[in-house]
Image (cartoon, rainbow, N blue to C red):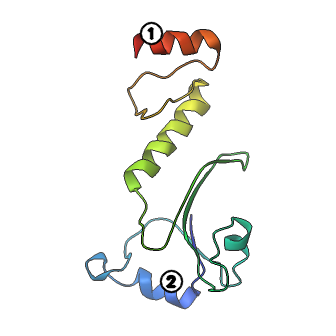
Amino acid sequence: VACSVDSPFSHHAWLSTPRAKGGIEGIKYPIVSDINKTIARDYDVLVPGEGIAYRGLFLIDKEGVVRHQVVNDLPLGRSTEEALRMIDALAFYEKNGEVCPANWAQGKQSMKPDQAGLETYFVNA
């Protein structure tokens, strides 16, 4: 789900504009209009006194727990590749119960979340 402090009318225009012209036509997920800025305020991404939001990305698990968040200043874009890597890592953890260390990617070694798992990981890393 995407969320923006723009109006539903802005979202419609953005969704109707081809990507080659700066739009997001063809996306397959919903966009929430946070016109009252409640969500942006609750997630602490509202720029004070400006009514706009920083570029935030939040990975929330099935229980509603924020497992990963990144908030960038306005001139800095987010990494789609890193977002997808974090989604893969959370799915792997939820399925296997093993920790995904720094720079982990699908197919790479994970580690059991205990002292023995830590030692085994670093011996083999």
**Secondary structure beneath disc 1?**
helix
User: What residue sits right under mark 1 in the picture?
Assistant: 123
* Mark 1 → mark 2, Cα distance in angstroms: 51 Å
Please report the residue visible at 59 percent of the width from the left and 76 percent of the height from the top: 53
Instruction: Pick the quarter of the image with the N terminus.
Output: bottom right
Q: Amino acid at mark 2?
A: His
Amino acid found under the numbered disc labelled 1: Val
Q: Residue at x 47, y 15 (%)?
A: 122
User: Closer to the camera, 74 or 78?
Assistant: 74
Residue farthest along the left direction in this orientation: 20
Left or right of 20 on screen, residue 115: right
Q: Secondary structure at mark 2?
A: helix
Report whether 1 appears left or right of 102. right
Q: Residues within 10 Å of mark 2 (few under 14, many from 20)?
A: some
Quarter of the image with the C terminus in it: top left
Give the x, y percent position of residue 33. Answer: 61, 79
Seen in the picture, residue 114 relative to 76 is either above or below; the reply is: above
Q: Is residue 24 found left or right of 97 in the rendered image?
A: left
Please give the residue where the numbered disc 2 appears in the rendered image.
11
Q: Residue at x 51, y 30 (%)?
A: 100
Q: Could you say where residue 47 lies in the image, as x and y percent from the top left?
A: 62, 77
